[in-house]
Image (tube, helix red, strand yellow):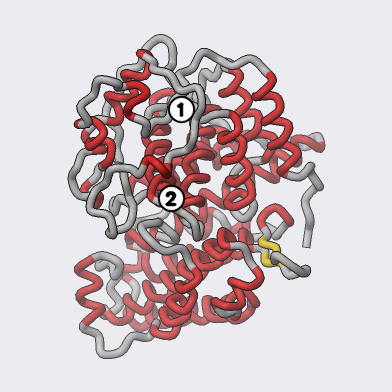
Amino acid sequence: MKTSEHSPPISTWVDSLRHEVEAGPHPQLPDFDPFDMESFLPDNDGLFADDLGALSTGGSSHDSSTLNPSLQAPLDGIYSSANFQEDVAFLQAAQFGTGPTEDVSLFPLPIVTSPTSDWYLPPPELGTTLLAEFLTDLNTAYPLYQPHVIADHLRTCYAGLPDDSAIAWTSAYIVFGMAHHMRGMSSTGDSHNMDMAQYYLARAYSTLDTLLTAPPSLGQVQCLVGIALLIVASPCSNKRPAGQFVSTALRVIRSLANEGKKSNATAQELSDGAHQRRVFWICFTNDISLSILSNTQPTHQLQDVANCSDFVADELGALTATEGTWRAHIFWLFTRIALLQTEAIDQVLSRKTCNTTPLDLSAATAIVLARLQAFHEQHHIFHLSASQLEQILYRADICHCVALEAYYFGTVYRLHAVTAMDMSSETNPFELDGLIKMSKMKQHKAYQEAQRLLSLLPVAPRGNVALYW
């Protein structure tokens, strides 16, 4: 196993950033709590608060969507700002109406921006705390950003430095949004954190016109993937836009890889290249999993990534036990199951198999299922019970383990559904029509895999949070 270069601990980057932000000059930005109505609408009669309350994604135990003031993050020094009126109009847009959550459209409405960008930042203490939680809870297992790079992005935002491509601001919104989402998945999580994750997704949408027209870069790819992750984590049932962002990110990063090959690369360039490969695999695993679940064709076929199969696990994508030396290279496991999913699509589920005989298709299905089973039996993490996972891992790490198990189950279930539907992949077994057809089957061959996944849910996050799809 190859190990990556040692870098300073996450706490070093976060503490350094927190000190610089608190001690340095601040840009003239409106400092407010986006869910505190009285601070910037003192004469409001409460109607807007009701509209904004539709953002609440809490449990069904509360009939009202109005946010609980006791759950709001404490922000000192809040003052009214006329510059925030465009954000008010944005939050009043149709996608935050009072209709059912599943009918919410994830596409942003056009926003008229002023010559001076009106961005929102949480207080420095809260912002750096959210950064630390993002790096620890999500980025450790899903290494989307290098710690020093994302710290520089936040430094750019808090110092008011130029950001013509909107990469720094979009990255900041992604970090804050995903950190709030992970907070919402914790044992002490509440609806306010899920509301804030939705708010930062909305703010990330407002940067798309600048982001998409910027020159191709790794930062642009990271932003596109980050927005896709926020979409998947949202309570809206329409996840298809996430696939469009991931597909675009995958195409951009493949073009960067083709342009960036050098014969005499420096140590820094080698390090950046290694991280670029990690981001490629994040794009790829999301693209493939969304294809499996939505019954759409992936951006790349198996032959397009055959030369990438030598990707080796390293310390940047590993889960570590709370005590002891036990480790699981969770990110590497995600890439391996993505390759098996790609094989399933290529050999069984793709449109090019329409001319394959049922006998050959059945044989190909059996081969892929056998490889999936061998993969599942080979790795120790799949043999740990829910109680064992709860004893040795932090809650955020358990989420990644359950997600990995769900990816495995989803792929096995998808393949068995093809067999049950007379070797036809046209019907998606994850959608209503497919579920109805599968419910009429007398025997379900993915029963054991489903039982294994369900056995882990008692230690998984509860409530209205997105865990794996």
Residue 436: image quadrant is: bottom left
Q: Secondary structure at mark 2?
A: loop
Q: Count residues near mark 2 (Cα–Cα under 10 Å), then give few for <14, some for 14-19, many for 20+.
A: some
Determine the residue positioned at 80% across, 47% down: 5
Residue 148: image quadrant is: top right
Across and down, in percent, residue 102 comes to 24, 52
Name the one closer to the observer, 155 or 323.
323
Name the one closer to the observer, 53 or 405.
53
Among the two numbered marks 1 and 2 on one chain, the one whose residue lies closer to the N terminus: 1
Q: With respect to residue 381, does 335 lie above or below?
A: above
Determine the residue positioned at 73% across, 57% down: 314
Residue at the bottom extreme?
Answer: 442
Q: Secondary structure at mark 1?
A: helix
Determine the residue positioned at 70% across, 38% down: 272
For residue 211, which numbered disc appears in the image?
A: 1
Of discs 1 and 2, which sits in the foreground?
Answer: 1
Across and down, in percent, residue 230 comes to 43, 45
Q: With respect to residue 230, does 466 lie above or below?
A: below
For residue 299, which numbered disc appears in the image?
A: 2
| Amino acid type at image mark 1 | Leu
The reply to whether residue 343 is in sight is: no
The reply to whether residue 404 is in sight is: yes
| Amino acid type at image mark 2 | Thr
Q: Is residue 176 left or right of residue 265?
A: left
For the N terminus, the quadrant is bottom right
Determine the residue positioned at 50% across, 36% down: 223
Across and down, in percent, residue 446 comes to 39, 82
Q: Count residues near mark 1 (Cα–Cα under 10 Å), then give few for <14, some for 14-19, many for 20+.
A: many
Name the one closer to the observer, 321 or 221.
321
Across and down, in percent, residue 372 comes to 52, 76
